[in-house]
Every structure is written in structure tokens, then in C-alpha cells.
Image (tube, grey):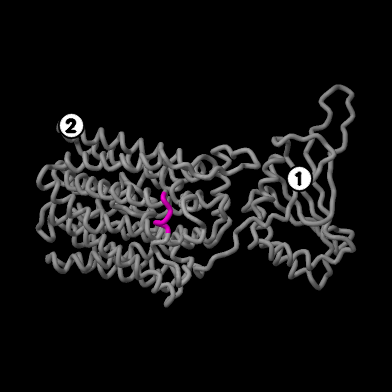
Amino acid sequence: MPADLKAQPVEDVAAAELAAEGVALPERASPFVPLRQPVFRAVWFASLASNFGGLIQAVGASWLMTAIAASADLVALVQASTTLPIMLFSLAAGAIADNYDRRRIMLTAQFFMFCVSIMLAVFAWFGWLTPWTLLAFTFLLGCGTALNNPAWQSSVGDMVPRQDVPAAVTLNSVAFNIARSVGPAIGGAIVAASGAFAAFAINAVSYVALLAVLWRWTPPKVERLLPRETLWIAMSAGLRYVAMSPNIRSVILRAFAFGFGGIVVLALLPLVARDLVKGGPLVFGVLLGAFGAGAVAGAFLSARLRRMLTTEALVRLTFAAFAVAVAVMAVSTSLWLTMPALCVTGGCWVMTLSTFNATVQLSAPRWVVGRALALYQMGAFGGMALGSWVWGRAILQIGTEQTLLVAAFTLLAGAALGLRYALPPLEALNLDPLSRWREPKVAVDIEPRSGPVIVTIEYVIAEEDVVAFLSAMAERRRIRRRDGARHWALLRDLTNAELWIERYDSPTWVEYVRQNQRVTQADAEIGERVRALHKGPVPPVVHRMIERQTGSLPGARPSPAPTLSETGPH
């Protein structure tokens, strides 16, 4: 069950699940070890069957659009209608995946797509499909994919031991690309022989095994010490974390650029098959199969290339190679020249997206990884959706060949973005919770929703250490705000030049607790740097206060704000 199940032929996360190759496997570990786990083995084979069905359906939808559409730009919109929902709804799906039972989320998404596929087959059988109803059905399938993706990516670790996760996600990527290698050709033959209805019906049937496996699976229960975040708060926390994480922001920008330029291959491939290579649905399926075969090859080559090249060098290389291959497709009228070019694009597709995915996974802790991956998907699929529309409009003005050449230049521009927004090295940070913080005992009755909670921390800093202190506090400000602190400020006492006060607040007590539990092992270095600069006779003093309104009863005297002070870790 690859991450972008049924988002075919756009395979952002399914191919990108190879991302975990960025976490090196021990030399002695077999890539097939995860298949020893009964649940993973059952899901893997069921997802392989489902991938075949999805790719057959994709061929049917794309080729049917070439037959019923009056305008060529509607062909490109088949891809846009699949990717647009992932851009729109992934963040909400990521928030849901981080807060609710992922198995139930996946069951809901798969059953929804099963029902949509049945309706698509019925409409095709009775001849009710128009270009816009076909786009509506593919849009609904994209909505199911958007709900499914974050839950699936976050649940792989529930099926196999932690040390087997890299091999497991690699196997998932291989499963998708095995299907991509031969599924489109099979789909082309089915469409040529029996029409689009047969392709849609096969896709509907392909969900059954996967639904049965998910229904029987009982994942381990995760004990929650804090109440679930509301959807809006969870989405805001995900946005805030990514906004305050420069590495993830760079990945999203580059993924958008790659999706925008790279989608031209999948969006215009039906027209390449029909107008440039002069073929039918079978040739279209063969060309998609060439793309899939290249993706499989890229899956096996990527780990070796990552050992040879830096992350940024690898991404620039794949951008440039993809651009050259697209240019070759633009000038080729030979099936035997276009197929190798598509193999190159397939390999670059997997290697680029897997590198992006790995960087996100290694830059986000578990509490927010679903939302971080969802935002990455929004960037990548947003670029794909916009690119599908732009390239579809472009062919009306300048033709297929020139559109491909323009897209090749945009990919080269995407490679040049690395000069300003370079990707960080692909190395695993220790993002496990720091677990040093303990919820303090309070002298005032408060509830989880009580607030706002105002926190001040007093530091004594020698004059010669001020520059180093300010540098460390700049990073501390980013971490505090990233994890949920509001209105962060650093104050200096006017009567005691060595006294500095860090101040911030949280909307409620439970959000304050949640914020402190989000501190990771990788963040510990900043806290240690700050404490090392503190010169006071006791550790930094922490005051935790809750805001109270002045007396609301006539004649009532305002009481002082409750406060709790302590020294030590904070």
C-alpha cells in the first residue's frame, strides 16, 4: 500500500517512500526482511494488486479523455484533478493522522475510493461520462488519496520493527514501480480491447483485498497522556513547525519546482503517444511502462548515488537529467528513442522525490511528522496541479513539442534554485523527546484549558558573554515559537545590566505542557549553551503565571496574579 495509493500515475509519496533509504541499512540486513512480518507481507501483496488496478484505471481515464475531450488542455487536467485535492487537503489529513487511529483513517479512505471507482465504472458502462464528470471522479479519487497518504506513511512503523522500517518503505516503493513497469501496458491492452469501462471495473475490484487486510489488522494501541488537539489547532501547529524549520521550507520550495516542471511528462504523455509517436492506447501504456521501469531502476540506484554525492548535488543532477530527457521527448518521433528518455525521467522522479521525502522525515519529530509530510506533499502536488494546468494551456498556444522544451528550461531553473535554497545533508537528527521536563506542581487550582499561561526565565549574563548569549537565544526563540510559544521576547533589566529575562506565553495550561513535551534531543544543545552562559548563584529562575482579570464584583479588590517559581530545567 504505497503512500500515494490510487494517485496514479502521479506517484509522489509512493515513489518517495524510498526516502527512508536515506537512513542507511546495515550491510548485513536483507531488503526482504520486512516480508517476514505477516501483517506487512499481507499488506504488501494486497497493495501490489491494488497498484495494478490503479494504474490500469489511470490509463483508461487518460486515454478516454483524449477521445471525448474537445480541447487538448482537458487531457492535462486529468493529472491536475488527481493532484489538486492532495494539495488542498493534505494538511488536514496530516493533522488527523497525527491525532486519530490511522488504521480507521486508511479504511475510510480506501472504502471511499472503492465506492467512487464503482460509480466511475457504472458511468462508463452507460456512456454517461463527459470530460467534466470524468474530471470530477478523478478529483474524488484524489481526495481519498489525500486522506490516505499521511496515515499510511505514519503507520509503516506499526507493522515492522523500527530497524526494518527503511527496508519496508523501500519494498513499498518497489511494489508500486513493479506495477508501474507493466501495469500501464496491460491497461493499454485492456482499453484497446474492451474500452475504458473494463479498466475502471478492474480498478474497483483491486480495492477488495486491501480493504480485507486492513480490516483484519490490529495495530498496537498508543496511550495518549494529553487530550487530542482540535483539527484547527493541530493544523496551525503543523504550519508553525514547518514555517520555523528552514530545512523543511527549502524542501517544499524545491519540491514545488520539481512538481511543476516534472509533471509535464505524465500530463502530456497521452498527447506524446498520439501526436509525436503516432500510437494508440497500447503505445501509451508501453510508454508509461518505460517510465515505471526507470523508476524501479532509480529505486535501486538511489542509495548508491547518495553515498557518492551530497544531497544537493544529487538533486541538481536529477533536475538536469530530467530536463535533458524531456527535451529529447520533444524532438523525438521514434518509440525507441522516447522510451529510454522516459526511463531516465522515471529514475529521476524517484530519486528526487525520495530525497525530498527523506529530508522531511529526518527533520521532523514523530508528533508532527504526518503534518510535515502533508505540507511537503502539498508543495509537490501543488506544483504538479499548477504545472498540469499551465502545460495544458501552453499546448493550445505553442504546441506539444515547444511546451516540452519550455518545461525542460523550467527544470533547469529548478536546479539553479539550489544556489539559494540548498538542501541540508541527509543525516538523521535525534528527534526523540528530550523527556527532562516534568509538569510542575501548582499552588493554584487550574484546569487544562486554563490560561493564558505566562512564563518568564531569569538569566544572569556577564558583559563579555552577551554576544554569545544573544546568538544562542536567537535559536532558542525559533525553537520556542516552533513548538508553540507565543509573544516571545527577550528583556534586559535597566538597573542590573547582567539580568536578562526571557518571556513568552501559551494559550492554555495543556498547550504549555504540550509545548515542553515537544522539545527534542537535538534541541538540548541550545539549552545547554544558554545554561552554560548563566553566571547566577542558582540555576535560571522560572516563573509560571496565569493571567487573571481584575475583580468583576462591585467593591472587589483585585488579587495578585498567581505565580509559581522554581529553579532548574525549564
- In this view of the protein, can residue 389 be seen by the observer? no
Asked whether, in this view, residue 402 is left or right of residue 422, the answer is left
Kindly identify which residue carries mark 2.
128
Which mark, by number, is residue 454?
Answer: 1
Residue 186 visible to the viewer:
yes
Task: Determine the CA span between mark 2 and mark 1.
Answer: 61 Å
Main SS class of the magenta portion in the image: helix
Residue 228 quadrant: top right
Asked whether 37 falls inside the magenta stretch, the response is: yes
**Which residues fall within the magenta stretch?**
34-38
Q: Residue at x 21, y 39 (%)?
A: 201
Q: Within 10 angstroms of label 1, few (less than 14), some, or many (20 or more) residues?
A: many
Q: Amino acid at mark 2?
A: Trp
Badge 1 element: strand
Task: Kindly indicate the quadrant of the structure image that contains residue 27.
Answer: bottom left
Tell me which amino acid carries mark 1: Ile
SS class, disc 2: loop
Relative depth, front residue between 484 and 195:
195
Where's residue 455, x and y in %? Answer: 77, 48
Q: Is residue 531 above or below residue 84?
A: below
Residue furthest out toward the top: 554
